[in-house]
Image: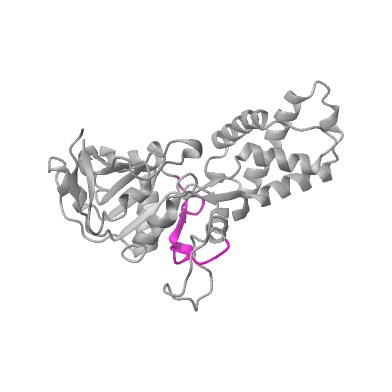
């Protein structure tokens, strides 16, 4: 059995979280929801199976990312083009006679595309990951919490309806705010202001670009403060304790690697990463897993965020790798 050592960290000046896949996830899956809404609009055409939509969506999304990175040309046009391409591919593959797709009037088709786009402009298409509520409850009063995401601007609507982003009412103090349940019945949460949600479509670059992380510090804190010099050769606990900004995410390329990349060592030296390695159905894990300190103290690996409760207070047991 690996030895666990107790690690207690000072509260950081800032903790940011990725949104999609970290805070919330589609329920049911995106292909399932696409299939359901298609059937509602075109009940006489026969169903398009989610598996087929999953394949065609992957093709359409990848092509759009390559041709128009970071929602270039406008996010609604970006997504409606993805939707059109998804169903053009899926319908062509699903029917031996493609006449069914041709029989849809242009007006009906555009109403469907717009309705599907707007469906994901709300909390009803998503649910909070099960470890988020307890984790954010435990930290939001002792550190600044923000969102750092490659999502488009609909992210704010989803976060508000799920109860993560506070209401726009100015008269609510943090003590008066309540948090949303799994279905977002409350609009008052742990992230205080709209500008505390930092989105790639507004910054002009996407993670893993270091400028996204710099923008988070600027927007939430007004600029970077002084950082204590720590050598990479220092022991991992000293390095972890020197971190002033932690970022939590589930994507290695976008949420972890930029914070340990030597080319960003000077720009992002005050940052550390919490790598969320959920497992199981829909990426959901149970609390009680190992907490690992890796990359010389700059990365904390965890399978459930509830296992970090106490890290910035009484401490938690970690395995140093």
- Magenta span has 199? yes
Asked whether residue 278 appears in the rendered view, the answer is yes
Q: Residue at x 64, y 36 (%)?
A: 31
Location of the C terminus (image quadrant): top left
Q: Is residue 292 left or right of residue 147?
A: left
Horizontal and vertical percent position of residue 213 = 36, 51
Q: What residue range appears in magenta?
A: 185-206
- Magenta span has 243? no
Q: Residue at x 16, y 47 (%)?
A: 237
Q: Is residue 187 left or right of residue 84?
A: left
Location of the N terminus (image quadrant): top left
Q: Is residue 133 left or right of residue 273?
A: right
Horizontal and vertical percent position of residue 40 = 78, 43
Q: How many marks?
A: 0
Horizontal and vertical percent position of residue 23 = 46, 50
Q: Residue at x 87, y 34 (%)?
A: 103
Asked whether residue 264 appears in the rendered view, the answer is no
């Amino acid at each position: 059995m690996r030895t666990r050592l107790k690690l207690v960290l000072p509260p950081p000046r800032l903790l940011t979280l990725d949104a999609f896949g970290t805070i919330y996830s589609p329920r049911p899956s995106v292909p399932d929801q696409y299939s359901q809404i298609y059937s509602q609009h075109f009940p006489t055409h026969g169903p398009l199976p989610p598996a087929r939509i999953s394949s065609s969506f992957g093709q359409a999304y990848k092509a759009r990312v390559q041709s128009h990175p970071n929602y270039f040309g406008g996010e609604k046009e970006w997504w409606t083009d993805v939707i059109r391409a998804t169903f053009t591919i899926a319908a062509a593959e699903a029917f031996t006679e493609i006449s069914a797709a041709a029989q849809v009037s242009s007006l009906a088709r555009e109403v469907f595309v717009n309705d599907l786009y707007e469906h994901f402009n709300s909390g009803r298409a998503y649910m909070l990951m099960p470890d988020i509520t307890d984790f954010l409850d435990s930290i939001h009063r002792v550190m600044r919490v923000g969102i750092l995401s490659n999502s488009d601007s609909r992210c704010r609507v989803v976060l508000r309806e799920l109860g993560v982003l506070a209401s726009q009412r100015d008269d609510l103090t943090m003590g008066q705010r309540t948090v949303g349940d799994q279905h977002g019945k409350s609009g008052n949460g742990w992230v205080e202001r709209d500008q505390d949600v930092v989105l790639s479509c507004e910054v002009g670059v996407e993670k893993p670009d270091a400028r996204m992380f710099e923008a988070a510090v600027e927007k939430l804190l007004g600029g970077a403060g002084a950082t204590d010099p720590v050598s990479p050769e220092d022991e991992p606990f000293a390095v972890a304790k020197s971190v002033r900004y932690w970022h939590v995410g589930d994507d290695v390329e976008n949420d972890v690697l930029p914070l340990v990349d030597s080319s960003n060592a000077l720009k992002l030296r005050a940052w550390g990463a919490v790598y969320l390695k959920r497992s199981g159905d829909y990426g959901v894990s149970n609390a009680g897993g190992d907490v690992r300190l890796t990359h010389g103290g700059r990365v904390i690996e965890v399978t459930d965020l509830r296992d970090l409760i106490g890290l910035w207070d009484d401490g938690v047991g970690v395995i140093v790798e």
